[in-house]
Image: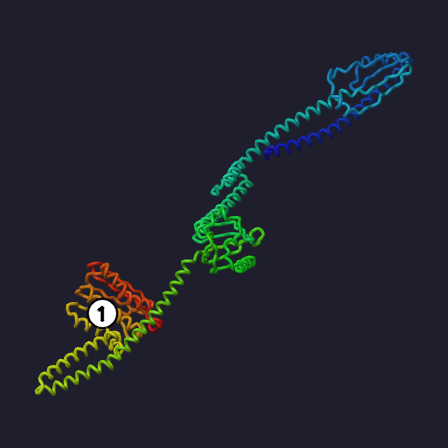
């Protein structure tokens, strides 16, 4: 039932109750009024008749008194509310009041008559030769009361109709905003959270409208936030899983499908123990205990089982899922990221670091062996060659005049010894440049440059040394020297270049090395060979010091070899 009908029903009920109470009061008052009217009328009638009889008895005898009374009654006619009958001594009816003509033919309903009729007794008066019977007749008074009551009832009925009509129209007009409110609620139910209600004239509905709009704002923001969270969960690259405290999975995002291989429709509702590898049960139980205690689990490196049984390295984070109504922990929100590639990269990095250390150790040992060989060549072979040259020169001097053949042979020995001496010293410089040990990197590089210019004058070798190149440490010094040496060797042997630019500069805590030529560039075969031999050695040396090595070159455009070496204690020592 609508509110309008309820209000009309309430008003109708109130008016009907008011009518019934009013009717009861009026009926009671009518009954009392009719009784008082009938009693008063009866008394007046008896007093009138008694007065007429007294006058008649004084003027005549008893028989004539009846005649006088009859004549009086006939002239009197009918008394309104009483029937008068005159009887002789033998009960002969001498007179009876004529019927009332007041509202003749009409009568009040019997039930109403019994309701308001006072039930009065007949009254009698002795006349000497007879008696007068006065019978109260309240039918006309009851009929008047009925007519008055009908007028009141019609008036109340009209009031009821008018009140209901007025209330119906007024309530309908007043409740007109409810249509807009209901329409707004329907739109909200369909998810149209942008719906807003206009201002209303009535204060109550305007308050409802403002409250509705405030609720719509909150719902719209909450819905937008939930959509963003759902979008994040759906598009997240991390596997997001929600399960209760018993391990039953209730949410499984696409990233979890990709990571573990289980479709959402297959695993939702099942236990998360499907993902637990053998031996990890205690870890999972400890995680659940932490979640029950409202503690977070962050960046735990562990393993989980995929659909095919493979174990996946994951980085796990978890948080308790709390019911906002009861403030109880009802589950766990788990985020897992595949770190298999990261773990592999870490292992590769560890292996690479180990290889770098091994390379540095090998290079150090190699340089030590080169130094030792250079020292042996200088100390032993160099002295022997010097002795041979000395002995040859002495023989040549002694046999110059007497033994020409021996003299020529001795001269040959001296020449071969000199050449051997130069070769030995060239080998020593290749093995270990003495300038690097005695003077430093700058002087060693300048000596190397001069040597190449002297040997290969057709190639213009230009060198720039910038910054403080002292106290760089033996490892850095030998690395830079070997790098430049290998690059210039490749230029001479393979590049067919006319110019070679060498640049070594110290910038803050880094040493930058660059060797550029204008030769034929890197062909496919040369690039492969260089990568397998010379370039591989240079790269290993530089990366062994945590540096960066690069080579650029196209056919016909020359080659640029660059290296950037950090200068710190680790790089300066082995």
Q: Position of residue 408 (x, y in %)?
A: 10, 82
Q: Is residue 16 left or right of residue 120?
A: left
Q: Is residue 454 above or below residue 12?
A: below
Is residue 98 or residue 325 the one in the foreground? 325
Q: Is residue 462 left or right of residue 139?
A: left
Task: Give neighbour class at mark 1: few <14, some 14-19, many 20+ (Cα, 10 Å).
Answer: few
Residue 349 left/right relative to 562: right
Q: Residue at x 66, y 31 (%)?
A: 15
Q: Give the side of residue 563 with respect to residue 169, left or right.
A: left
Name the residue tied to disc 1.
464
* Residue 305 x, y percent position in the rendering: 48, 55
The quarter of the displayed image where residue 393 is located? bottom left
Name the quarter where the C terminus is drawn: bottom left
Q: Position of residue 20 (x, y in %)?
A: 70, 30
- Up/down of 492 relative to 306, above or below: below
Instruction: Please indicate, yes or no, whether residue 180 appears anywhere in the rendered image.
Output: yes
Relative to 289, say whether 508 is above or below: below
Describe the colour scheme in one phrase. Answer: rainbow
Q: How many marks?
A: 1
Secondary element at image label 1: strand
Name the residue nearer the viewer: 312 or 573. 312
Can residue 228 be seen here? The reply is no
Assign the N terminus to one quadrant of the image: top right
Where in the figure is residue 564, as x and y percent of width and height? Answer: 30, 66
Identify the image quadrant of residue 467: bottom left
- Viewer-proximal residue among 97 and 160: 160
């Amino acid at each position: 039932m609508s509110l309008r009908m309820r209000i009309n029903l309430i008003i109708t009920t109130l008016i009907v109750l008011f009518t019934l109470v009013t009717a009861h009061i009026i009926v009671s008052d009518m009954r009392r009024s009719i009784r008082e009217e009938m009693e008063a009328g009866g008394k007046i009638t008896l007093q009138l008749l008694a007065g007429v009889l007294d006058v008649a008895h004084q003027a005549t005898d008893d028989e004539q008194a009846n005649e006088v009374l009859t004549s009086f009654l006939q002239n009197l006619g009918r008394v309104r509310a009483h029937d008068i009958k005159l009887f002789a001594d033998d009960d002969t009816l001498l007179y009876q009041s004529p019927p009332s003509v007041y509202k003749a033919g009409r009568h009040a309903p019997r039930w109403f008559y019994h309701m308001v009729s006072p039930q009065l007794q007949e009254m009698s008066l002795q006349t000497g030769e007879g008696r007068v019977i006065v019978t109260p007749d309240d039918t006309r008074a009851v009929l008047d009361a009925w007519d008055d009551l009908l007028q009141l009832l019609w008036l109340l009925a009209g009031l009821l109709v008018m009140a209901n009509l007025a209330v119906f129209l007024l309530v309908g007009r007043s409740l007109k905003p409810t249509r807009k409110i209901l329409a707004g609620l329907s739109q909200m139910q369909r998810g149209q959270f942008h719906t807003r209600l206009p201002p209303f004239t009535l204060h109550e509905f305007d308050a409802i409208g403002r409250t509705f709009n405030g609720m719509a704002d909150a719902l719209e923001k909450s819905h937008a936030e939930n959509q963003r969270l759902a979008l994040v969960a759906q598009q997240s690259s991390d596997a997001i899983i929600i399960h209760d405290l018993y391990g039953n999975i209730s949410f499984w995002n696409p990233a979890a499908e990709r990571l573990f291989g289980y479709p959402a429709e297959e695993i939702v509702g099942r236990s998360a123990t499907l993902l637990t590898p053998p031996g990890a049960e205690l870890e999972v139980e400890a995680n659940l205990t932490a979640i029950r205690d409202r503690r977070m689990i962050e960046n735990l490196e562990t393993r989980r089982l995929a659909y095919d049984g493979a174990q996946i390295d994951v980085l796990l984070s978890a948080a308790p899922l709390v019911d906002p109504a009861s403030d109880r922990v009802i589950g766990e929100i788990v985020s897992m990221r595949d770190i298999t590639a990261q773990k592999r990269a870490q292992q590769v990095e560890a292996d690479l670091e180990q290889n770098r250390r091994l390379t540095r150790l090998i290079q150090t040992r190699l340089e030590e062996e080169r130094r030792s060989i250079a020292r042996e060549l200088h100390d032993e072979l160099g002295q022997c060659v010097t002795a041979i040259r000395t002995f040859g020169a002495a023989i040549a001097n002694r046999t110059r005049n007497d033994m020409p053949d021996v003299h020529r042979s001795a001269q040959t020995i001296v020449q071969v010894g000199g050449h051997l001496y130069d070769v030995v010293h060239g080998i020593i410089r290749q093995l270990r440049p003495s300038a690097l040990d005695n003077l430093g990197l700058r002087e060693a590089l300048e000596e190397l440059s001069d040597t190449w210019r002297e040997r290969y004058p057709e190639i213009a070798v230009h060198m720039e040394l910038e910054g403080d190149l002292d106290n760089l440490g033996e490892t850095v010094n030998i690395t830079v020297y070997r790098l430049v040496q290998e690059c210039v060797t490749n230029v001479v042997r393979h590049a067919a270049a006319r110019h070679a630019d060498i640049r070594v500069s110290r910038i803050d805590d880094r040493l930058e090395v660059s060797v550029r030529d204008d030769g034929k560039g890197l062909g496919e075969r040369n690039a492969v060979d260089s990568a397998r031999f010379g370039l591989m050695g240079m790269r290993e040396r530089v990366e062994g010091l945590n540096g960066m090595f690069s080579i650029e070159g196209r056919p016909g455009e020359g080659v640029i070899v660059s290296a950037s070496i950090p200068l710190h204690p680790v790089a300066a020592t082995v």
